[in-house]
Image (tube, helix red, strand yellow):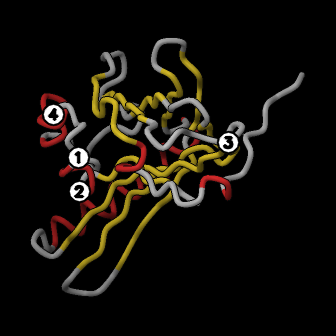
Amino acid sequence: MRLLLLSLGLLAGCTSLVPSTVAQLDGFSPVTADPADIALALQLPEGVGLTPAGATLFLGAERDDTGEETGLTIRLAQRSDAELGEVFEIAPDDRAAFRAEQARIAAWQAEAPEAVQGTLSLGVAPCRFGAGPARSARASADIRFAQGAPFRPLLREAPLSRIADQGDVSEWPDCVTDAT
């Protein structure tokens, strides 16, 4: 089971989005952004955690003119922050691969700007504590566009059912806690 929390196209219709941050997304280019700058913070509802697989970021594109596709999925580094919740960033060891994928997509865009369709999405692998989240559970997310810049609210109190396919929560794996 995977939850798709951030897909720039899919979130466009979500009423829980913060308009001022969405306006900044209009100027954000995943093809030119420094991978060290990109970070997302999630505030998950009670009963929801993440499996050891955590979160992944996918950057890819396809060309309508040649049928070629490219894509890279990176497991994001995760850290807990008392204020922000769970923070996800591209690990330093993965930044070169991300930059290489950006360069490939940028080259395609230079060759055939109208033929290239890009995708940037974040997926998380949920687990449940106890019975899992309540049907009315809500989640929030903040995003950072530059290192050292403050996180900006992206998603506020979005119903989990709107941003995630909760399916049968009883089928989610149990969250493992470190008992040491």
Work out whether residue 52 or residue 93 is closer to the camera in this orientation and state it: 52
Work out whether residue 176 or residue 142 is closer to the camera in this orientation and state it: 176
* Crowd around label 1: few <14 · some 14–19 · many ≥20 (10 Å): few
Query: What is the x, y in percent for residue 9?
Result: 23, 56
Q: Earlier in the sequence, mark 1 or mark 2?
A: 2
Instruction: Tell me the quadrant of the picture where the N terminus can be found.
Output: bottom right
Q: Which residue is mark 4?
A: 24
Point out which mark residue 14 bears.
1
Mark 2: secondary structure: loop
* Crowd around label 2: few <14 · some 14–19 · many ≥20 (10 Å): few
Mark 1: secondary structure: loop
Work out whether residue 93 or residue 141 is closer to the camera in this orientation and state it: 141
Instruction: Give the foreground label among 2 and 4.
Output: 2
Left or right of residue 50, residue 26 in this image? left
Mark 3: secondary structure: loop
Q: Which residue is mark 2?
A: 9
Kind of residue sitting beneath label 3: Ala
